[in-house]
Image (cartoon, grey):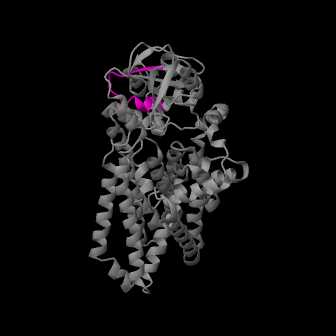
């Protein structure tokens, strides 16, 4: 039965608010897609989708010879020489832990529409729109209350975290959709108990596992949640075994590519990063000092009270499902960092399921408080405050995207029509600046040339002016300083090479 307070809130004014927030969510996801330059991880997506490898790049262009900007761009474009098989081989050889579905979709998108930065990012933005119906479906399956679903959608629409990853050429927006669909499909299959429903759930498992291997803990949590889903779960999981075998056979390469995650940081820094990442779900993470501490504390309290209320006021079948959405990746990523050391858990993008569970819990808490009838105005204002913070944060991101180190350095380099950029890489397998160099190639003039080497090689410096050294490793910087003057230009990342 719908209470009077619910009828009052679920009014034309509320529906107007939902419409405005959803439209803003769409706007934030598509505005200024080209303003933020490609970064390291995104060019790796282009590299894999086009079927190239790091080994090819380092062998062919990190040889000390002067090369054109176009030589770097060709490794990030679809060419007749590289097929779909090459795309798979590239992943297997160098990043077996990355499953191929998203790269395959990006490759198809590139073939259809080209590889302009705005075009490729629009793919992730489009995927992020599918989050709204998927989230609504999951909330209805969980609570059977539209108010909770609509509030969850509004929180999602203006979440700076979700908006940020909706504008990256990476798989996280698509992964978000697969998590929500897989979760909703399970609840529906349990409810209706039909072969079609269980088949849909099984297929959703396959899609999610071929999008991110981090879906595995969620599949395990589903097995713990319901014994009735074992058959669908098993056949869905079995279809992912071929790629799991690929990972197993190339485990050393996967570990090598992720070795940076094992670097230890102080526990206080680790916890601080967790709180900042949690804050980013509702509010920009660029606040500093006392304000940052206050807002972070309020958000942590908000999340705690929401989870507490969920457990107290919903059946076990509901709150346990939401907790099983939140907890698995915390145990798989955050706990090992605490016990063994590492910084895996400082990457907020790995905790998409956890954040989805938190948003659902917060939406439930606010909806139930608004429906309770007591202090209704207070709870409405709290919801509006959270939504306003999200709107302001997403608005700020539009302008923050225009402030970027590589854009600044490229603008300096572009002052010369005959610039040469010198840089270097750790080894023929990468692990250094290769992704940054590839990203920079999108920003500099077409006439810009590059001279790239592998440690410990030293380039033969051309006899001309306007030579820049970009993010040099210490050995290169020290060696060049023996014969030249390195004039710092920008944050110890860009130097001008001058005669002594």
Residue at 44 percent across and 67 percent down: it is: 140
Inspect this view and state whether residue 146 appears: no
**209 above or below 84?**
below
Magenta region: 436-451
Q: Is residue 174 magenta?
A: no
Give 450 or 149, whichever is nearer the viewer.
450
Q: Quadrant of residue 420?
A: top left
**Residue at the farthest front position:** 500
Q: Position of residue 475 (x, y in %)?
A: 60, 25
Q: Position of residue 192 (x, y in %)?
A: 49, 64
Q: Position of residue 84 (x, y in %)?
A: 45, 27
Seen in the image, is 250 located left or right of residue 318? right
Seen in the image, is 66 located left or right of residue 350? left
In this figure, what is the number of numbered marks? 0
Quarter of the image with the N terminus is: bottom left
Give 493 or 150, whichever is nearer the viewer.
493
**39 above or below 468?**
below
Q: Quadrant of residue 308?
A: bottom right
Inspect this view and state whether residue 326 appears: yes
Residue at 48 percent across and 34 percent down: it is: 493
Seen in the image, is 278 located left or right of residue 73? right
Give 162 or 338, whichever is nearer the viewer.
338
Seen in the image, is 64 located left or right of residue 392? right
Q: Position of residue 147 (x, y in %)?
A: 40, 72
């Amino acid at each position: 039965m719908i209470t009077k307070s619910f009828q009052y809130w679920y009014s034309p004014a509320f529906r107007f608010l939902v419409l405005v927030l959803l439209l803003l969510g769409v706007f934030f996801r598509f505005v200024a897609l080209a303003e933020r330059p490609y970064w390291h991880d995104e060019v790796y997506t282009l590299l894999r989708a086009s079927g190239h490898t790091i080994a090819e790049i380092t062998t062919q262009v990190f040889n000390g010879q002067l090369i054109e900007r176009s030589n770097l761009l060709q490794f990030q474009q679809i060419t007749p020489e590289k097929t779909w098989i090459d795309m798979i081989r590239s992943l297997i050889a160098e990043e077996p832990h990355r499953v191929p579905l998203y790269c395959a979709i990006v490759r198809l998108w590139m073939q259809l529409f080209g590889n302009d930065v705005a075009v490729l990012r629009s793919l992730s933005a489009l995927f992020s729109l599918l989050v709204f119906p998927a989230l609504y479906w999951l909330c209805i399956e969980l609570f059977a209350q539209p108010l909770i679903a609509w509030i969850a959608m509004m929180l999602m629409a203006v979440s700076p975290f979700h908006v940020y990853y909706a504008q990256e050429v990476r798989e996280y927006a698509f992964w978000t959709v697969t998590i929500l669909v897989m979760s909703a499909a399970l609840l529906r299959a349990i409810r209706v108990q039909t072969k079609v429903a269980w088949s849909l759930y099984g297929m959703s498992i396959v899609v999610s596992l071929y999008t991110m291997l981090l879906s595995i803990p969620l599949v395990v949590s589903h097995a713990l949640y319901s014994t009735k889903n074992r058959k669908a779960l098993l056949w869905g999981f079995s279809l992912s075994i071929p790629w799991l075998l690929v990972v197993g056979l190339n485990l050393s390469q996967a570990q090598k590519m992720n070795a940076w995650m094992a670097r230890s940081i102080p526990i206080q820094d680790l916890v601080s990063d967790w709180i900042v990442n949690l804050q980013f779900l509702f509010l920009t993470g660029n606040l500093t000092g006392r304000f940052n501490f206050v807002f972070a504390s309020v958000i942590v309290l908000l999340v705690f009270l929401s989870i507490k209320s969920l457990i107290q006021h919903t059946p076990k079948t509901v709150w346990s499902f939401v907790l099983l959405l939140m907890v698995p990746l915390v145990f798989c990523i955050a706990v090992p960092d605490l016990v063994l050391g590492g910084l895996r858990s400082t990457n907020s993008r790995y905790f998409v399921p956890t954040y989805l569970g938190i948003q659902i819990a917060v939406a439930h808490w606010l909806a139930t408080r608004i429906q309770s009838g007591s202090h209704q105005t207070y709870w409405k204002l709290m919801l509006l405050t959270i939504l306003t913070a999200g709107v302001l944060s997403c608005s700020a991101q539009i302008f923050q995207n225009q402030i970027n180190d590589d854009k600044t350095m490229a603008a300096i380099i572009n002052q010369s029509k005959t610039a040469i950029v010198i840089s270097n890489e750790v080894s023929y397998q990468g692990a250094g600046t290769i992704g940054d160099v590839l990203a920079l190639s999108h920003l500099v003039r077409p006439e810009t040339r590059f001279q790239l080497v592998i440690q410990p090689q030293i380039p033969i410096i051309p006899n001309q002016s306007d030579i820049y050294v970009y993010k040099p490793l210490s050995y290169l910087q020290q060696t060049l300083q023996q014969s030249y003057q390195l004039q710092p230009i920008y944050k110890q990342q860009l130097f001008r090479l001058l005669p002594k």
